[in-house]
Amino acid sequence: MIASLRGLVTAVGPEQAVVEVGGVGVAVQCSPATLALLRLGEPASLPTSLVVREESLTLYGFADEDERSVFELLQTASGVGPRLALAMLAVHGPDDLRRAVAAEDIAELSRVPGIGRKGAQRIVLELRDRLGAPTARSPLGAGSPHAGAAAGWRQQVHGALVGLGWSAREADSAVDAVAATADEQQPDVAALLRAALRALDRTG
C-alpha cells in the first residue's frame, strides 16, 4: 500500500500529475481541485490510495487525509468504483458530499455524471451513517484556498469535464460560460468546475 507521496511535481495535466520520488516519476490521478494546488517544479506531499486491479495499478492522490478518507468510503457503496468516486469529488468537495448525503439530496448527488436517481438513492442509503458530519475545515469546498497562478485553469476545468463524460464542444461552451467569473490571478478551479457543471445542467 502506497499511503503517501512526497517529491517534486514534474507534470500536471487535466486528470493526473507526476511526482518525482527518488528519481522515479510516479503518475497520480487527482481531482481538479487537488491538481490546482500543485505547482510545477515545487515539492508536494499527497496522501494516496492505491487501487489494484487484475490489469492495472492506479494511484490516486488527494489534497488531505479527509479527501482520501471520503474517496475510500464512497467505494464501499454498491456500484461506486474509484473513477466514479473521483468524479464525485470533482463535482462536490468532501463536506458538500456529507451535506448532500445527510440531507438525502438526490438531485445534488445526481449532478455527478454516471449517477442516476436510483444510484444516488443507494448511495444515501448505504453511506448516510458512515460519512459523518461536515468538518470544520474543508479545503476543497467553498472556503478552499485559491489555486494560485492563473495559468492552466481553463485546461484543468475543460479536461475535468471531458473526463466526466462531456464532449469537448460542451466543455468549451461551459468554460466560456464561467470565464467571466474567474479571478485570473487566483482562480478557484474547484468553484469554476462546479459553476461549469451548473451551466451544463441548464443547457442539457
Image (cartoon, rainbow, N blue to C red):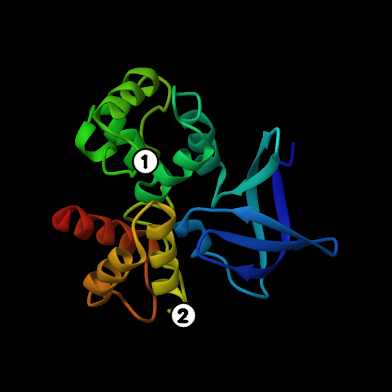
* 76, above or below 160, in the image: above
In the picture as drawn, the residue positioned furthest to the right comes out as 22
Mark 1 or 2, nearer chain start: 1
Check if mark 1's residue and mark 2's residue have beta carbons within 8 Å.
no
| Mark linked to residue 95 | 1
Q: Would residue 142 be seen by someone viewing this image from the given angle?
A: yes
Label 1 crowd (10 A; few <14 / some 14-19 / many >=20) = many
Q: Amino acid at mark 1?
A: Asp
Distance between mark 1 and mark 2 Cα atoms: 27 Å
> Label 2's element?
loop
Q: Is residue 129 left or right of residue 182?
A: right
**SS for callout 1:** helix
Question: Which is nearer the eye, 52 or 40?
Answer: 52
Q: Position of residue 161 (x, y in %)?
A: 37, 58
Name the residue at the left extreme. 202
**Amino acid found under the numbered disc labelled 2:** Ala
* Residue 113 place in picture, x, y as percent: 33, 44
> Going 27% across and 44% down the picture, which residue do you hit?
111
Residue corresponding to mark 2: 151
Tell me: residue 16, above or below residue 152: above
Q: Which callout, 1 or 2, points to the residue nearer the camera?
A: 2
